[in-house]
Image (cartoon, helix red, strand yellow):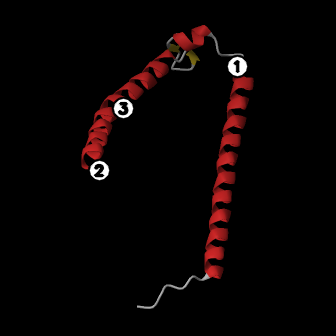
């Protein structure tokens, strides 16, 4: 069997291509985070004046167009708790299986 020949030019092209791809994806990640901060900033600046304790703790009225968002907050909490109850046992079983079987 012939020895494996290193082709320096191909390795250099692969490394350059890989560095370019990593840099591109890092740039896209920073762009997504920046857009998220812009959206959150806009919401906080424009909507901060209407958020009050009554808005957060009262139920909506008049066809869900006035008052509060408390049922939505509670529903989100129930969704998080329910999905955690379903997913945690399977994660623990998988972790134990991975630990025991390698």
| Residue 100 place in picture, x, y as percent | 25, 44
- Left or right: residue 27 versus residue 14 is right
How packed is label 1: few (under 14 Cα within 10 Å), some, or many (20 or more)? Answer: few
- Left or right: residue 59 versus residue 48 is left
Of circles 2 and 1, the one toward us is 2
Contact between marks 2 and 1 (CB within 8 A): the answer is no
Q: Which residue is mark 3?
A: 83
Instruction: Specify the farthest residue to the bottom.
Output: 2
Separation of residues labelled 2 and 3 (CA atoms): 27 Å
Name the residue located 29 percent from the left edge and 46 percent from the top edge.
98
Q: Which residue is mark 1?
A: 48
Front residue (pair 74, 59):
74
Q: Earlier in the sequence, mark 2 or mark 3?
A: 3
Q: Is residue 55 above or below residue 19?
A: above
Q: Which residue is mark 2?
A: 102
Separation of residues labelled 2 and 1 (CA atoms): 51 Å
Name the residue located 39 percent from the left edge and 23 percent from the top edge.
78
| Residue 63 place in picture, x, y as percent | 51, 20
């Amino acid at each position: 069997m012939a020895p494996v020949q290193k082709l320096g030019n191909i390795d250099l092209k692969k490394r350059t291509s890989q560095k370019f791809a990593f840099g591109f994806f890092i740039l896209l990640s920073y762009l997504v985070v920046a857009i998220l901060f812009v959206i959150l900033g806009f919401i906080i600046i424009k909507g901060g004046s209407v958020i009050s304790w009554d808005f957060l703790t009262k139920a909506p009225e008049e066809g869900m167009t006035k008052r509060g968002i408390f049922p939505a907050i509670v529903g989100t909490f129930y969704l998080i708790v329910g999905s955690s109850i379903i997913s945690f046992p399977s994660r623990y079983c998988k972790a134990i299986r991975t630990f025991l079987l390698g």
